[in-house]
Structures are given as structure tokens and as C-alpha cells.
Image (cartoon, coloured by chain):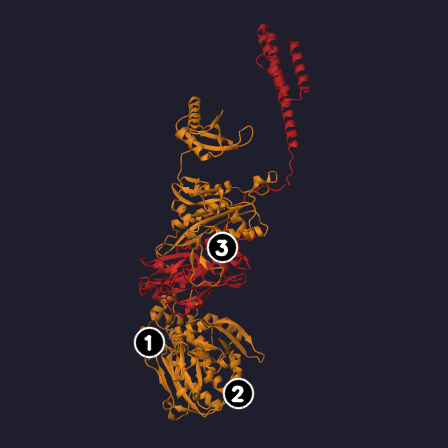
Amino acid sequence: MADELDRLAEETRAVLRVATTPDALAALRRDVFGRRGRIAVLMKTLPLLTGGERAALGARLNQLRISLEEALAAREAELNSAAMARRVEAEVIDVTLPGRRGPIGRRHVLRRTLDEVERIFIGMGFEVVDGTEVETDEFNFGRLNMPRDHAARDSQDTFYLSDELLLRTHSTVVDAHVMVGRTPPMRVVTSGRCYRRDAVDATHMPVFHQVDGFMVGEGITFADLKGVLASFAREMFGSGTRARFQPGYFPFTEPSAELAVTFGGRWLELGGCGMFHPRVLEMAGIDPQRYTAFAFGLGVDRPAMVRYGIPDIRLLWENDLRFLEQF
Amino acid sequence: MRVLLSWLRDYVDVTDEPDVLGEQLPMLGLGVDAVERLPDGDVVLDLEISSNRPDLLSLIGIARELAAWRRRDVRLPSDDVVNVDPPSGTVTAVEIVDPALTPRYVAHVLTGVTVGASPAWLAYRLEASGVRPINAIVDATNYVMLEWGQPLHAFDLDALAERRIVVRLAAAGERLVTLDGVTRDLDPEALVIADARRPVALAGIIGGAETEIGPTTRMILLEAASFRPASVRRTSRRLGLRTEASMRFERGIDPEGTLRAARRAARLITELAGGTVLRTPVDAYPAPPARPVISLRLARIDRLLGVHVPTDEAIGILSRLGVHIHRDGDVVRATPPVGRRDLEREEDLIEEVARHFGYDRIPEAMPVEVMSQGRRPARLEAEAAARDALIRAGLTEALTVSLVNQPLLDRLDIEFSDPRRIGVALTNPLTTEHTRLRPVLLPSLLEAVRVNVNRRREAVHLFEIGRTFMRTPEGEIAERRHLAIAMRGRWLQGAWDQPADVQEVTFFHLKGVLETLADELRVGPLSIRGPRERERWLHLGRAGQMFIGETKAGDLGELAPIVAERYDLPGRTYVAELDLEVVLDRAMLQPRYAGLPRYPAVRRDVAVVAPLDLAHAVIEGAIRDSVGELLEAVELFDVYTGPPLDAGMRNLAYALTLRAPDRTLTGDEVEAIIRRVHTTLSARLPVRIRV
């Protein structure tokens, strides 16, 4: 019996030394540790032995089982890691080959700008509204205090579709619509395409974008106008931005101002603003004695060009992907 | 307006450096285009004047602004003249036919003048102001125009038939040779100054050559008038003729200022050219307008501006601007000066106070108001969501001009009977490139594709969301949001181990984008029907119509080869044009949680051999019908044509995912379902099941 144990130990270790495949190890494990393996067979002979011998050999057999188990596990781990090493060695790739990419879409730079502007005004409690690009002469001009024959119409050379229908020259026309039938207070902002009868060149397009907004209430002042637009300018162009308000002229505001902000060490002109002319409020059915209102109209295309360093307005409309993909 | 600084100092003390003026005048609302230094050290300020301030097209108007700004006084020039008999009315007569077009016409008569060149100082002032010196008499009228803003004209009185002036509309067929030597055909809406026989000047714009002041002129009729701005503007535009005079009349000349300017010019002429002024000028002034008196509530200044302006300061500003003030407790009765017709109501005066108080002294405040909820309407939210979905699907947003022309639209090959072929015409297009509003987006978007392909950018995946325009049968304009997509060329970058054709965009990439859009907006069941009913601009065999439920949303497919050729696009381009409103109407932006499955799913594959013309959608529909609600998903994972299949046949392999919400499906149940699928397919369709 003792010899049997020695032989088992010796033979098992010999097989372990030469085994080079997981299969060989599996066979050995079956042969030695299996249900009918050599250790099991030896275990079965133990009860046939006498008390003292049985205890001694039993202990030896147990020790042997543990040591062989460890040796086998060690050899398995060794072979496994060698196999892993061979596999990864065989799977070398050229990591300098280009990465694979699906297409990434982008917003147009003007849309991106419009979204930013809207977000800022929503943050100040403004409600965004939508308008139409085709408008009536009455709303685009008349309701904004520019009756027919008004001199200011000349500077807004207009595309007409009929005597009464035209392409809006400013999104301020949306203000005139929104005020009708609503009761103050109101704070509203709108944006979209506007049209002027301009030939295409590096600084002009017949189509351009504008953001317009207004606020009506019982105590709205010119100081509020300055505060809201200066706050907008700081959000849009950075916290150190200063806003400049210079007197200007718009038929629908009184007093009126031109807004410019500091950007890149220069003044960037953003648009016009002022207190709504009482006649505009009257035409919208709002009592100008009780309520006052400020309004503003901001350019989008040219400020975006300055902000991003775009030299030619036609780039915005040409849709060259090498341009679009930069934003 | 070119302002010679040394001349301006005649009327107000200006001590500021030119550069300071250049910086500060815009803060008063006087735009400075340039500060120009003359060789002799003098300075010209080139000012931009807004259309509501005709008074600022004069040195005295500008002097008033500077006086109010620097709290100084204005010096007005002398207009004392020695008058002699007989009265002007005995020598000439003035008739105004329509007072609405000509509120006032003043005519001074001067006799015994000697026409010569102006003195150097005067010629210098005119030239620096951008006006060419002609002779002393014409120069005197121009000088006073620059000084007071009132355009004047001098006629050779002896050249006027019957020495008479009639201000009337031109008669049909009348012509006038103007001072610039051009013969002009007059239309019946043109307001003219005529003598007894013929037009001798275009009212408010330019004089006539035949009555011009010349070396032999001895008697002068000196005109100072006020004409209706719209009339002058119309004729000036029609003739393409803008002059210093028309520029001023277009903005409105206060009739109250005519007499004073005429007297000033008469005095200047006698100084420069000798002669005498006949007494009592002819003054045709049929209906002098009432001078407005404006009530200004002092409290209203602070209420509108949001800052406290001391009353003394407010009143001081208005007075220096020439406004006559009568204080009555908390209210001021204000009479604006002659020439300030823009001051009509309280707010106009408050603006004057604000300008000179200083906009930069008004604080930046945040409005104290009832809180309000910032928001976007659902339609704009849905549009933003659609844009976002398309961008995440890999497309780049394009913006194209909404004005097109007929040749561009024609390139798309829209059906002749289709109203989308023409869009909406502009009545006054400026260029042949932009003559109508687009009825569809694709023609412009394809133009953008062409630009990219021309520049060797082959992979183009663009979309545009924009308005389209159509005339309704009622004559109104229907404005609808559309979505156009154009995709071509490589889809994947860096797919260097894939065959080129696998990397290319196909019809199914385009369809995938639309499926993504429909899924992201949760618009409900989307189906693509085709290919036989299609738009002419789509490839006959590779076109479809997109439906949401039973509503058509648009068309998609490969661009028809003939259209691709017109756009100079080699290879295949896939396009879609959708009425986005149909999609947005059904958008559901609010997600709702659906319980995660608690029991395992079973996957089974079903493969069928079917004729090529049997649509996948039909087979998939039959599978869905036969399984019923235990079918969680059915995915087509392989399509094969070629040996050993017969020609005209293809193999389609579907992976079915089966799941019950309340239990684990048993093997027997699953087998029964699959057998049912097999039976249904074989019974209903000309297919063979591959087991």
C-alpha cells in the first residue's frame, strides 16, 4: 500500500512534467482524481487495513492528494498562460491604421447661434413664439408706425408678392401680431428668416436672420431694456462684455437705441432697440398710459460672422461641408 | 452730411478736439462716418443722419445739438435785408395747384444783380461740404441750404414766360432739360415748377437749363418752398436722380422755415452779387398748419427711462434744442422749433431729454415684473427634436436661400400639372437668380450637393429644414416646413478592410435615417410604399413614398439619372423631400416607461425562398399575422440570391424573438408557433420554407 502511494506520486509527477496540452492534463485529472481514479481506488482499500496502519496511510494519502492537486493546478495555470501568450502573440494588429467612424452630423453655425440666443432669453423668462415669413404690408409696416409713404420704408427695400403681401423685412412684425389680444405682462422672443431686396455680395444676402423680442408691463423702463440686453450680451459673449447704447432711429420705438457690444477689442453692432412707440401699443390694443414696453431686434448673421471670424457671408449659404464641419 | 468745423463755429462754440467729437457725437445719435482732416488743418465731420431728422442736414441743426450737449447757446446768422419798392407781387405771381403737394411757396425778387464768381472763403466752404461752386447766386442758395437745411432755387426771372410760377403736376408728354443737361420725359405724377407755358424745374429735385442763372441774368426769382416728401421721393426714385435738395425734401421741410431761409439767401446774394431785394416776397401759403403744443408730464420722463432726471436739466436740454417751454406745475407745454416736425408727442420729447442726459447715465436694471415661464411652443420643440434626430443620424444641417428661379426649379423635373413646379413669384425681383419663393427644398439642396461634389467632396450627407411656399386656390400663401435630405458617397470613414461598395450610401441608409426620425419623434407606424408610384425626379425602380399611418409625408429614393446629370452628379444620390408638418403634427416628445420583460425570450429563425418581386414587407406582415402578440420582434438578417437558388428567387432569413409577458414559453409552445408560421407562409405566399 505504501509502495502504491509512492508509485502514484512519482508517476503523476512524471506525467505532469511532460504534459503540454490542456487535454493531457484533463486526462491525468480524470485518471488520478476521477470517481474511479487511482486515489479513489486507494481510498476504498483503506478500511481493509488495521487501525494504526489505516490512520497513518490515510493521513499520507490525504497529504498526497492535496500536494498532487496543487501540482496539477499549478501546471494547468502554467499551460493556460502560455496558451494566452501564444494567442495574443498571433493577434497582433497595426494600431496605427485609421480609426473607423460613422458620420457625425452638425447644426448649421447660424442655427447654433439662434439656439444660443433663444436659450438665453428663455432663461430670462421669455416665451418663444413663431411667425410666418410671408406677411402683410399692414403688419410689417403699418402696425409698426410706418404708414405708406413713410421715409423709413426706403431703407427696407422690400420684396412684394402682391400689393398687400410681402416678405417680412424684420421679425419685429411678429411682435405686432403677438401683442394683439393678449393682456400684459408679456415677454416674448421670436427668430427667423427676414428678407431685403439686396443683391448678393460678400456682406449682403437677400435673406438673413433676426431675433426680435419685447416686454410689456406696468413699469417697464429704458433701464430695464439696458439691463436685459446687457445681461444677454454677457451670456452670449462672455462675462466681461460691455454693452453700448447709442441713440438711433426706428419708427416703432421712442426713444430708440443702437446696441453694440465689446468683442475682440472692438465694437460689434448687434441691432436696434428702444421703448415701443405708444402708437404701436395703441394699434395692438394696449393702453400706452398704463403699460410701457421695450423691444429689440438683433442681427444674427453678421454677429455670428464676427464671432467665428467668417469673412464672407456667402459661406453661410453655400453649404460647403469643409465649412459646415468646422462648427 | 459733411460739416466743416470752422464753419460750424460761426453758430456755436466748439472747443472739443475733432477726435472727441468723432467719439461723442454718436452718443447723441449723430453717426460719424469719418473725421477728415483738410490740408490747411481744418476738419470735416462726415455725419450720418437718420431719416427722421431733416433738420440735421443743416449746420444750424447740428449747432443746436452741440449747444444742448455742451450747455452753450446758438448764434443765428443775420437775415436783415433792405427792401425796396415795388412789392414783389407786382413783378411776379405764384400759383399752387394742389396745396397737399406744395404747402408753401415763397418767392423773393431781386433786381440789378451782377453774376460773377463767389469769393474764395465761400467757395472753400461749399467745396469742403461737397458742393461744387457755380456762381455767386447759385452758391448763395447752396450756402443757405447747408446753413438752414432749406433748399432754394434761383430762376432767371426774364426767362420765365409771363414771369409767373405755377406749381403743378406735369402734363402728359412734357419734357424738361435739367441743369445736368439731360432731357427728361416727365410722367403725370411728377410735381413740377412751371412758368406760364412749360415746366422749368422738377420740384424739390433739380432746376431746368433754360431758366438757369447766367452771365446776363439781371433779375432773379428766388424760390424757397415746401413740397410733399412722398412726391419728391417718388419722382427722384423714378428718375434715378438724388440731389442735395431732394435728399432734404424727402425727409420733410417745415414750411415755417421757408421765409426765413429765403430772406437769408436774399441778403447773402446782395452781399455777393449786388442788386436790391424787392419788398414783400410773394408767399403762397394756403393752409398754414397749427404749431403743435405738446404736453410733457415731468413724472413720465423718469417712468419711461427708469432713472431720475432733474427737472431743471430736462428743461435746460429742451430749451437749448430750441423747444419753447411753458411750465405749468408738473406738466410742461412745449412748442418745438421750426424744422423739428419729428417732435409730435410726449415720448419724442423724452427721447430728446434722454439723448442729451446721456444713454450711458441710465442704469442697467433687471425688470421687476410678475414672474413668467420661459418656454418654446410644442411645434418649435418638435422641430428642434427632428433636427436633433437627423444630426444624431449623421446628417449635417444646410441652409439654402429661400428665393430661387424657374430654371433651378425646372431642373428637378416636377410634373407639369404640379403646382410645386412654380412656387410663388415675387412682383419686384432684384436679380434673375432670385425671382420666386421655393415650393420645395430639394432643388436648392441639390445645388449645395453639386458645389461639394465639384470641389471633390464626394461624401455628402446633408439635410435642410425650411419653409416652402405655395399659392392656395384662395390666393393666399401656404407656408409649410419641409425637410429635404440628400446623401451620397461614403458613409463610413476608416473602413479600409471593407469593400468600397459596402462603405457607400444606399437607399437603405436614407430609409434608415427616416426610420430614425420617425422613431425619435414617436410618430407611430411608418411605412415606405413603392416603387411604382413615384415622383418623376426619382429613379423608377428605387423610389418610395413615406406614409405615417395612412397619411403621406413625402417621397424618397435614388435621384433619377436624368436629374443627376443636370446637377452634374456622377454616381448615385439618394434624396427625400418631406412635408415636415405631417411628421411634427404626430410627434410625441414625452417618453413613457414600458415595463422591462421578466421572462426570457426565445429566438427562432425562419428562412424562406421567395420570388424577387415578392416584397419583404409582405412576408414580414404574414409572419406578424401568424405569430400574433407573442412576437416581440422580427428582424431580417440575411438576403441571398445566386446558386443554388433558381434565377428570380431569393432567400430571406428572419430572426423571430418570441416572448410571453407572464411566463417562460415552453419548447412545445415555440414549436407550435413556428409550425404555424411555416403553414401560413406556404399557404398565403408563393414561397418555399427552408428548414
Q: Name the disc covering residue B475, or none.
A: none
Q: Secondary structure at mark 1?
A: loop
Q: Quadrant of residue B74?
A: bottom left
Q: Which chain is red?
A: A
Of the two numbered discs 2 and 3 on the same chain, state the one appearing first in sequence: 2
Q: Residue at x 62, y 13 (%)?
A: A60
| CB contact under 8 Å: marks 2 and 3 | no
Residue matched to label 1: B292
**Amino acid on which the number 1 mark rests in the picture:** Pro
Residue matched to label 3: B408
Q: Secondary structure at mark 2?
A: loop
Which chain is home to disc 1?
A: B
Q: Secondary structure at mark 3?
A: helix
Q: Quadrant of residue B591?
A: top left
A117 up-or-down from B349: above or below = above
Of the two numbered discs 1 and 2 on the same chain, state the one appearing first in sequence: 2
Residue matched to label 2: B119
Inspect this view and state whether residue B558 appears. yes
The mark closer to the camera, 2 or 3, is 3
Q: In x, y percent, where is residue B535?
A: 45, 46
A168 up-or-down from B256: above or below = above
Real-space Cα distance between discs 2 and 3?
62 Å
Q: In x, y percent, where is residue B274?
A: 47, 92
